[in-house]
Each structure stands twice: as C-alpha cells, then as structure tokens.
Image (cartoon, rainbow, N blue to C red):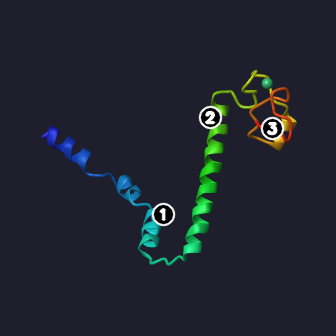
Amino acid sequence: MAYERSVEHLTKPSPEVALNHKPLQIVRLQRMENEEISLSASDLENLSVKVTEIESRLARLQTIVRKIDSDAYGKCEACQAEIDLEVLSSNPEASLCAAHAPEPGEIV
Ligand SMILES: [Zn+2]
C-alpha cells in the first residue's frame, strides 16, 4: 500500500542519516568520558578559574557579535557617534566615544 510504504520510508533512516547519526567526534568524546580522570583539588580550582575566564570572554564576544549584527558596533552608547578606529583597535569592546568615555583613572 502506498501509505505503508511512505511510513516505512519516514521511519527508516536513509544511509546518510545513519552515517551522520554518530559522527566520529562524538564516539571519541564518549570514550574520553569513560576514561578515569584523576584531578587534584588545585587542578580543579585552576580549571574552574579558566572556565570562568573563558565564559566571561565568550559573553564579551557575544556582545560584540550582537552589536555587529544590529549595526551598533563602533557607535557610542551615549550619543551614537562613531568611536575612533584607534580606540576600537586598542579596545574592541569600547562602547563610548572620546567625549563620553571616562578619563583614565576616573571611577565610573
Ligand atoms: Zn558619545
């Protein structure tokens, strides 16, 4: 029957799907999970600090990407003026123009 054949087609994975179902990288990761790893308390502490640093860096990069996507990157958050390229190249996260940026040493 045509209906049964179409259902069978939908439930039976195509060869490509079967091949992509478990990529080699995933198998490798699973193998690593199964290995016994012993870490000292200071190793764990160092890893935890690194993870925190990486998460903070990722969040800052995501902010930059969001600004680029919304065409807000390089514009002062206070007055929308273009931020000097010199400022952006030394600090890609700069969000204020020279007029609105705090002086070095000034407490914000
Ligand atoms: Zn400004």
Mark 2 neighbour class, 10 Å CA radius: few under 14, some 14 to 19, many 20 or more: few
Q: CA distance from mark 1 to mark 3?
A: 38 Å
Mark 3 neighbour class, 10 Å CA radius: few under 14, some 14 to 19, many 20 or more: some
Q: CA distance from mark 3 to mark 2?
A: 16 Å
Figure disc tally:
3
Where is residue 91 drawn, in percent x and y? Answer: 79, 42
Closer to the camera, 75 or 43? Answer: 43
- Which quadrant, please, contains the N terminus? top left
Earlier along the polypeptide chain: callout 2 or callout 1? 1
Dot 2 falls on a residue whose secondary structure is helix
- Label 2 is placed on what type of residue? Arg
Q: Label for residue 47?
A: none
Earlier along the polypeptide chain: callout 1 or callout 3? 1
Q: CA distance from mark 2 to mark 1?
A: 30 Å
Where is residue 72 drawn, in percent x and y? Answer: 69, 27
Residue at point 18%, 44% (across, down): 5
Closer to the camera, 24 or 44? Answer: 44
Give the image quadrant in which the ligand numbered 1 is located.
top right
Residue 77 found in image quarter = top right
- Label 1 is placed on what type of residue? Gln
> Is 25 drawn above or below residue 90 in the view shown?
below
> Is 52 drawn above or below residue 104 in the view shown?
below
Residue topped by disc 3: 88
Residue at point 76%, 21% (across, down): 79
Q: Find out whether the residues at labels 3 and 2 contact each other: C-beta distance under 8 Å.
A: no
- Label 3 is placed on what type of residue? Leu
Residue topped by disc 1: 25
Dot 3 falls on a residue whose secondary structure is helix
Closer to the camera, 68 or 78? Answer: 78
Q: Find out whether the residues at labels 2 and 1 contact each other: C-beta distance under 8 Å.
A: no
Residue topped by disc 2: 66
